[in-house]
Image (tube, helix red, strand yellow):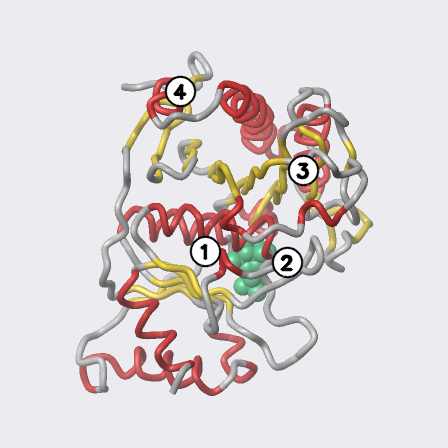
Amino acid sequence: MKRLNTVLQNDGAPLELILLIRTLLAACKEISFRVGQGALAGVLGSTLSENVQGETQKKLDVISNQILKDILSESGYVKAISSEEEETVVPCNPDGKYLVSYDPLDGSSNTDINSLIGTIFSITHAPQWMDPSDPSAFLQPGTQMVAAGYVLYGPSTMLAMTTGRGTHLYTLDKTHGGFLLAEENISVPEQTKEFAINSSNQRHWEAPMQDYISDLLMGSEGPRGKDFNMRWVGAMVGDIHRILCRGGIFSYPFDKRNPKIPGKLRLLYEANPMSFLIEQAGGAASTGAGRILEVMPTEIHQRVPVIMGSKEEVETCVGYHSK
Ligand code: P6P
């Protein structure tokens, strides 16, 4: 099985980006170990603090964020970091060539039930003009990413990553710490019968999403003429991994409860990296009004509505929004 380095070199990634990715994955391997210890190491449960998102931080949120922050900031490759768990940017090496945005432990509410969680990351070039403490350098559209991926801490620890030359899946071989290629150029089936959405929010969605999901639920007796299945992991990283592997459509749509916040998921370190992976695998990723990767960010914790997965199904869903 091909090693990660070989694939990255074949895909033309520059040496410094390969070294940064290896450094980031070293942090993820440590997180995988800490997550795997669970109750044995007293890392489960919540802290008494809230993050900038107003969410109670799990102990593993704080641990994972600290591991990534320490390892990336010492690497020399990174000019600055933005993290779901950090209120503002973390300045690193003024001569660093890259910016890294990450959700250190996506779906961390799953930690206490031993369910799927993961680290999501996005890498862009650092403008040479920027001061390392200047958040504005992160306000680049997703099309500017040079690499994106996630590490899924499940029965096996798996990496999905792209540097713009296809999406590839790797499995961590814990006997020697290498990520070995599991599937090269994975392709998301264009059609699907499986959708992922938190249906308990149905009354808060706008009419187009309510109509779209209602038609799915009518199955073969409704306008879609086929039955659908539903899955919801409660961790984007788990739902998107399933979609990369067997197709599907995932949505966390606009929610009328707080019009100022157009959705739950964050653009820089959730929607953008997942959109890059999905598009590189032949899928589609939309806010309902446009391509997620073309959204111009206005602040580092900006949220967006998310519809992504099997290309034809995303186009059908987006069609409800343009009626
Ligand atoms: P809900 C995890 O907290 C997350 O940000 C995504 O990973 C996940 O898809 C979503 O929120 C789950 O949200 O409202 O179903 O708990």
Q: Give the foreground label among 2 and 4.
A: 2
Q: Are marks 1 and 3 in contact (CB under 8 Å)?
A: no
Q: Residues within 10 Å of mark 2 (few under 14, many from 20)?
A: some
Q: Residues within 10 Å of mark 3 (few under 14, many from 20)?
A: some
- Tell me the residue that label 2 is attached to: 297
- Tell me the residue that label 4 is attached to: 173
Q: Is residue 305 above or below residue 97?
A: below
Q: Amino acid at mark 2?
A: Pro
Q: Amino acid at mark 3?
A: Pro
Alpha carbon distance from label 3 to label 2: 16 Å
Alpha carbon distance from label 1 to label 4: 25 Å
Position of residue 165 measured from the top left corner of the image (x, y, whole percent): 35, 36
Position of residue 202 measured from the top left corner of the image (x, y, whole percent): 49, 80
The structure residue drawn at horizontal position 72% and vertical position 39%, both measured from the top left corner, is 62
- Tell me the residue that label 1 is attached to: 233
Alpha carbon distance from label 1 to label 3: 37 Å
Q: Give the foreground label among 1 and 3.
A: 3
Alpha carbon distance from label 2 to label 1: 27 Å
Q: Residues within 10 Å of mark 4 (few under 14, many from 20)?
A: few
Q: Residue furthest top?
A: 176
Mark linked to residue 127: 3
| Sequence-first disc among 1 and 4 | 4
| Sequence-first disc among 3 and 4 | 3
Q: Residue 160 appears in which quarter of the rendering?
A: top left
Locate residue 16 relative to residue 70 in the image: left or right.
left
Residue labelled 1 has its Cβ within 8 Å of some atom of ligand 1: yes
